[in-house]
Image (cartoon, rainbow, N blue to C red):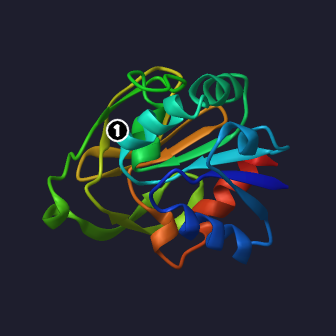
């Protein structure tokens, strides 16, 4: 298994480290030639969604990434990655994200909550996090915190409003690898 990690900015190294702990090969995607390498899935990490969209366009990667995901390539989008996959951005997932929904950096928090498909509660770190404001009929809600949708799945697309790569728990990455497999 070989996973591409969008490395334009944000928390991409932490995702690579999580996958390395699980024995999975990763490579960084910074430009179109990187994207053209063989891969089984992609991770779109947390970071700054506006900057990431701008860089995807500037690097000529927006259309190829959209086509691959729309064609069924598994994707994990965390925080900004959730925003990028919504209707108003890359547009492959039938969700609408509410950006910076918990306020500024000071509104960041950590909690533990249930996640459908993973036994017990998992740690969730929210940093200037979004949540899912609307989800279409094909979208499966996987987790809610304080009545807000913070994780969902549509086909091979998995999104979280939190940063699983910033906690020590590997269960969310294992869940994603089961989608890829």
**Above or below, 109 relative to 51:** below
Query: Residue 70 location in percent, x, y?
Result: 65, 23
Asked if residue 49 lies left or right of residue 99, the reply is right
Residue at left 43%, top 62%? 163
Q: Is residue 151 in view?
A: no
Compared to residue 21, the image places residue 66 above or below, namely above
Q: How many labels does the image show?
A: 1
Mark 1, other Cα within 10 Å: few <14 / some 14–19 / many ≥20: few
Residue 181 coordinates in the image, percent (x, y): 82, 49
Is 78 left, or right, of 19 in this rendering? left
Task: Please report the residue visible at 47 percent of the width from the left and 55 percent of the height from the top.
Answer: 9
Q: Percent position (x, y) of residue 145?
A: 30, 54
Residue 155 makes an appearance in the image: yes
Who is closer to the viewer here, 99 or 26? Answer: 26
Residue at position x 63%, y 71% in the image: 18
Vertical position of residue 44 compared to residue 54: above or below: below
Viewer-closest of 59 and 82: 59
Helix, strand or loop for disc 1 = helix
Q: Which of 19 and 36 is in front in this view?
A: 36
Q: Mark 1 points at which residue?
A: 50
Q: In which quarter of the image is the N terminus?
A: bottom right
In the rendered structure, the answer to whether residue 16 lies left or right of residue 161 reads right
Percent x, y of residue 75: 63, 42
Q: In this view, does 165 lie above or below 161?
A: below
Q: Quadrant of residue 149?
A: top left
| x 44%, y 35%: residue | 53
């Amino acid at each position: 298994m070989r996973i591409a990690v969008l490395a334009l900015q944000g928390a991409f190294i932490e995702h690579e480290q999580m996958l390395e702990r699980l024995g999975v090969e990763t490579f960084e995607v910074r430009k179109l030639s990187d994207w053209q390498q063989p891969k089984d899935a992609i991770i779109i990490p947390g970071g700054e969604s506006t900057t990431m969209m701008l860089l995807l366009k500037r690097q000529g990667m927006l259309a190829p990434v959209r086509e691959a995901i729309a064609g069924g390539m598994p994707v994990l989008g965390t925080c900004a990655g959730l925003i990028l996959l919504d209707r108003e951005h890359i547009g492959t997932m039938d969700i609408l994200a509410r950006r910076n929904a918990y306020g500024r950096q000071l509104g960041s928090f950590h909690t533990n909550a249930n996640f459908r498909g993973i036994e017990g509660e998992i740690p969730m770190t929210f940093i200037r996090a979004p949540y899912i404001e609307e989800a279409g009929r094909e979208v499966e809600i996987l987790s809610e915190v304080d009545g807000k949708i913070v994780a969902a799945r549509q086909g091979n697309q998995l999104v979280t409003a939190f940063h699983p790569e910033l906690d020590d728990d590997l269960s969310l990455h294992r869940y994603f690898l089961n989608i890829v497999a």
